[in-house]
Amino acid sequence: MRIVYRILCYLVVPLLVGVIVRNGFNSFPITVTCSIKDYTGLDCPGCGGQRAIDALLKGKLKQAFYFNQLIYVYLGVLGYIYILFVETYLIKNKVFKQRFGFANWFVISFISLILLFFIIRNL
């Protein structure tokens, strides 16, 4: 039973979210503006992320990278956070978070990468 539950959590839920997002992007051409760009005129590290995700859903990998160069890093980290969430809170695997949780050096490196990207992007 636990294996079926894992399959549902890891495959069905992300596929459903993907279908909903893909259909939502196609039927509602709503774009959200960046508050940081509106107030400061600077591109934030997330600027272009919505267009990048839309391009990814359409299979345009190169175009997604053009919109936001960190999109693949963001998606990798979000995927890992999803795995941590499923294992820790849905499946109640207490050992998983202790063994495979984010190390401090990774969090510091990730935040440094985002800040460096913000600075380079706005030079």
Image: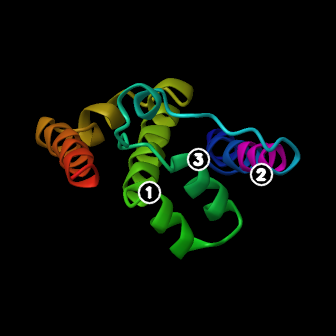
Type of residue at label 3? Gln
Type of residue at label 1? Asn
Name the one closer to the observer, 6 or 63. Answer: 63
Q: Residues within 10 Å of mark 1 (few under 14, many from 20)?
A: some
Label 3: state its secondary structure. helix
| Percent of width and height locating residue 21 | 74, 44
Look at discs 2 and 3 and give the one toward the viewer: 3
Residue range corresponding to the magenta coloring:
17-25
In the picture, measured across the screen, residue 48 lies left or right of residue 59, that is left
Q: Mark 3 points at which residue?
A: 50
Q: How is the structure coloured here?
A: rainbow
Name the one closer to the observer, 41 or 3. Answer: 41
Say which residue appears at 64% left-offset and 63% top-offset.
55
**Disc 2, disc 3: CB below 8 Å?**
no
In the picture, measured across the screen, residue 77 lies left or right of residue 13, that is left
**Can you tell which quarter of the image residue 33 is in?**
top right
**Disc 1, disc 2: CB below 8 Å?**
no
Name the one closer to the observer, 120 or 90. Answer: 120
Residue 22, label in figure: 2
| Percent of width and height locating residue 77 | 38, 47
